[in-house]
Structures are given as C-alpha cells and as structure tokens.
Amino acid sequence: MRFENNRSGNGGFITLNNETDEIGRLTYTIFPDDHKLIISFVLVHPQFEGRGMGKFLVEDAIKFARENGWKIYPHCSYARAVMNRMDGVEDVLLQHLK
C-alpha cells in the first residue's frame, strides 16, 4: 500500500493505493494563515471497507499536519469519530473551528 498526497494550492487529497487500485481517498483544505487543515471527506471504496483503510488515511493526514505544524478540524464525521477514539492526537485535534 502507498499513500499519495495530491496538494494543489490550499486543498488536495490523499489517496491510498495498492498495486493496481485506489483503495480510498481523504480530501482536505488548508488554511495556512490559521495553521489549520480541515478534513472534508474520507472515502473507502466498497470492496476495501471494513479493513481499517479509512483510519490509515486519517493517520496519514495527521502525519501531514504535524509535519507542517497545523491543527486538524475533522469536518467529516467519520474522521472526527476516528480521531476522537485515537490516543495521542490531542496536539493536533481541534474540536471546534475558531
């Protein structure tokens, strides 16, 4: 499995791929002046559901945010649920947009 971050300006998406297929993707928007990354949507294609692939995408977004010194607001309800269950994300998780 490999992650690809396709950033363009203040937005983009992270894809998770195997050798032949896209497994899923996470879309985001960046507010660089506010040091925030908003997770808009997480999608895992049906044939790959139930294997934790969505969580892998959220974890890669957390890594990306930490590398850039950003906080994350998970607008996507799935991403919010995943992050609320994770330990060790208090440094990046925003519960509310300010």
Image (tube, helix red, strand yellow):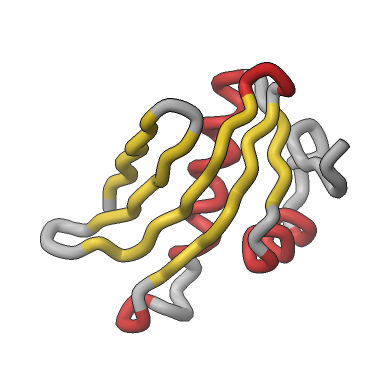
User: Residue 51: image x %, image y %?
Assistant: 44, 74
Residue drawn at 60 percent across, 49 percent down: 39
Residue drawn at 55 percent across, 39 percent down: 29
Residue drawn at 59 percent across, 39 percent down: 62
Of residues 13 and 23, the one drawn nearer to the viewer in this rendering: 13
Location of the C terminus by quadrant is top right
User: Residue 90: image x %, image y %?
Assistant: 82, 39
User: Residue 72: image x %, image y %?
Assistant: 69, 39
User: Residue 28: image x %, image y %?
Assistant: 53, 44
Q: Does residue 47 sit above or below 5 in this rendering?
A: below
Looking at the image, residue 92 sits to the left or right of residue 66; the answer is right
Res 69 → quadrant: top right
Of residues 21 and 97, the one drawn nearer to the viewer in this rendering: 97
Of residues 47 and 96, the one drawn nearer to the viewer in this rendering: 96
Res 31 → quadrant: top right
Of residues 32 and 42, the one drawn nearer to the viewer in this rendering: 32
Q: Does residue 17 sit above or below 62 in this rendering?
A: below
Q: How many marks?
A: 0
Which residue extends farthest left? 20
Residue drawn at 31 percent across, 41 percent down: 4
Q: Does residue 42 sit above or below 62 in this rendering?
A: below
Res 40 → quadrant: bottom right
